[in-house]
Amino acid sequence: MFYRRIFGMPAFSSFQPFEELSRMRRQMDRIMDSLWERPGSAWTAGVFPAINLTEDEQHFYIRTELPGLTAENLDIQATTRNLTITGERKLAVENESARYHRREREGGRFSRAFALPKEVDAERIEAKMENGVLTLKIPKAESAKPRRIAIGK
């Protein structure tokens, strides 16, 4: 015991090779159990809103699902290489006596900002909201579009 305290090593008489691993496993189990037991917003579905970014030769397209939001709840800003979608999702207030059995929908302010793969013409971006899906049609800047090069004779 004295040797163990001084040198931080187990005494040979009480050496159990898997004792430390068992102790670490118990600690991890306690940590994981405490995470699962968090009330209210224990686990959310992830980043909101999720987006899809696609492109063709002329445009980038961003599609994101924003159920329950209107254009008045959104602010979209763009520069030549960056885009930000900011808004607020308001949920109906539950009765004070209501108990949640599962809570995955959250309300409140959100913001998604990301860099676009190439320069865009921010002045000509088109946005439309239809059935809770926001679609942005983002024209590429002339410098970002592919050019066909003719081969001389």
Image (cartoon, rainbow, N blue to C red):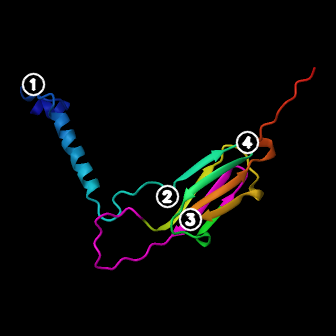
In the image, what residue occupies the spot 73% across and 46% down?
119
- Dot 3 corresponds to which residue? 131
Tag 2 near tag 4, CB within 8 Å: no
Real-space Cα distance between discs 1 and 3? 71 Å
Q: Where is residue 42 in the image (x, y as percent from the top left)?
A: 33, 59
Q: Which numbered disc, 1 or 3, marks the residue closer to the eye?
A: 3
Tell me which numbered mark, 2 or 3, is placed earlier along the sequence.
Answer: 2
Q: Where is residue 131 in the image (x, y as percent from the top left)?
A: 56, 65
In the displayed structure, would residue 148 be above or below residue 142?
above
Q: Which numbered disc, 4 or 1, marks the residue closer to the eye?
A: 4
- Residue 27, image quadrant: top left
Q: Where is residue 51 in the image (x, y as percent from the top left)?
A: 55, 52
Q: Residue 48 carries which label?
A: 2
Specify the quadrant that holds the C terminus: top right
Real-space Cα distance between discs 4 and 3? 27 Å
In the image, what residue occupies the spot 21% across and 39% down?
24
Q: Please state the extent of the stretch shown in magenta in the rendering.
A: 77-105
Q: Under tag 2, what secondary structure?
A: loop
Tell me which numbered mark, 1 or 3, is placed earlier along the sequence.
Answer: 1
Q: Which residue lies furthest to the bottom in this view?
A: 96
Real-space Cα distance between discs 1 and 2? 55 Å
| Amino acid on which disc 3 is placed | Asn
Q: Which mark is residue 12?
A: 1
* Residue 91 painted magenta: yes
Tag 4 near tag 1, CB within 8 Å: no
